[in-house]
Image: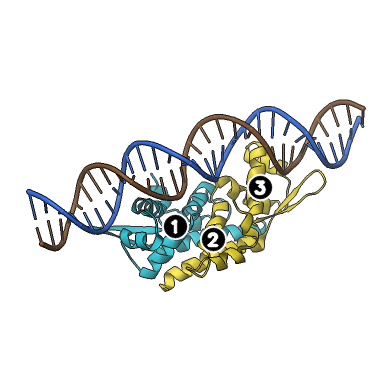
Chain colours: A cyan, B yellow, C brown, D blue
Amino acid sequence: MTESLAEPDRAASALPTCTSDSRIVAARFAALSHPARIEILKHLSASRSCCCREVVDHLDLAQSTVSQHLKILVEAGLVRFEPDRQRSRYEVDHAALADVSASLAALVDSCCSGG
Amino acid sequence: MTESLAEPDRAASALPTCTSDSRIVAARFAALSHPARIEILKHLSASRSCCCREVVDHLDLAQSTVSQHLKILVEAGLVRFEPDRQRSRYEVDHAALADVSASLAALVDSCCSGG
DNA sequence: ATCGTTCATCGTCTATCGCCGATGGACGAT
DNA sequence: ATCGTCCATCGGCGATAGACGATGAACGAT
């Protein structure tokens, strides 16, 4: 359902200013708009790659809740998911995250340039 | 929900975990996590400064809804509000927006450095 | 004084979020 | 085969977001 979120970078880089869809940009920010998910991203990057259980222990949230947050991050394309036997591996997609940052930077730039 | 956004230093120091408070970062992204608010930011920057009515006409949303979105953006510190007699003036706070972008860039950087 | 415009706020409704416990599947170990 | 662990998903619950119409205040114009 969120395949379009996995690769909006092309559109973002192809169109210089305000032409990028606000819904796409908003959806990506929505994935970052929860403290637990920010924490997850930090923890994931610190551990380079870890399983759901580890995040659960770090965050002091129910396993189902963490799994939900991870799913949201994966669907947003910010986290890569790799089912490894029993322990699913999650790792930050640095490129995607950098792309979101670029989107925001582009927004800031368009706002500053007054276009 | 965002009263503490005006002075994030206190809450930031209250959280022991990471350098920047995830709640603050998340709250700022939350302000950007709605297409209407993205559009508002674009329109505001394009017009340099405009009143609520103009945004209403541009967005095709009810006036009360737009006023709510503007309030959220103002409370998040991304938009400056200046009551001008009848027509309230809204304009993008470029510095604040750049600051949010810097926060995200810092997050990306921390993720890439593997800290 | 009256009317039209602009805007913020209130009350309400619906949809979604965020959280949890429970469940069941997959797998390793005994 | 059985148990324990890990994980994704389901169902439910409370809280919140987002939308709207209605209302009233502030102001300019007639």
Q: Quadrant of the N terminus of chain A?
A: top left
Q: Position of residue A34 (x, y in %)?
A: 48, 55
Comparing marks 2 and 3, which lies closer to the viewer? 2
**Circle 1 — which element?**
helix
Q: Where's residue D30, x and y in %?
A: 91, 30
Tell us which disc is closer to us: 1 or 3: 1
The one nearer the camera, B73 or D6, is D6
**Which of marks 3 and 2 precedes in the sequence?**
2
Marking on residue B25 = 2
Q: What residue is drawn where x is 55% and y is 46%?
A: B35
Return the residue at label 3. B70
Q: Are marks 1 and 3 on the same chain?
A: no
Q: Is residue B65 left or right of residue A3?
A: right
Residue A52, x across and y down, in percent: 32, 58
Q: Pointer 2 indicates a residue of which chain?
A: B
B89 relative to A95, above or below: above
Left or right of residue B89, residue A35 in this image: left
C-beta proximity under 8 Å, tags 1 and 3: no
Give the residue displayed 58% in from the left and 55% down from the top.
Answer: A17
**Callout 3: SS:** helix
Spatial CA span between label 1 and label 2: 11 Å
Residue A55 vs residue B89, the one in the foreground: A55
On whether disc 2 and disc 3 are found on a single subunit, the reply is yes
Q: Which residue is mark 1?
A: A37
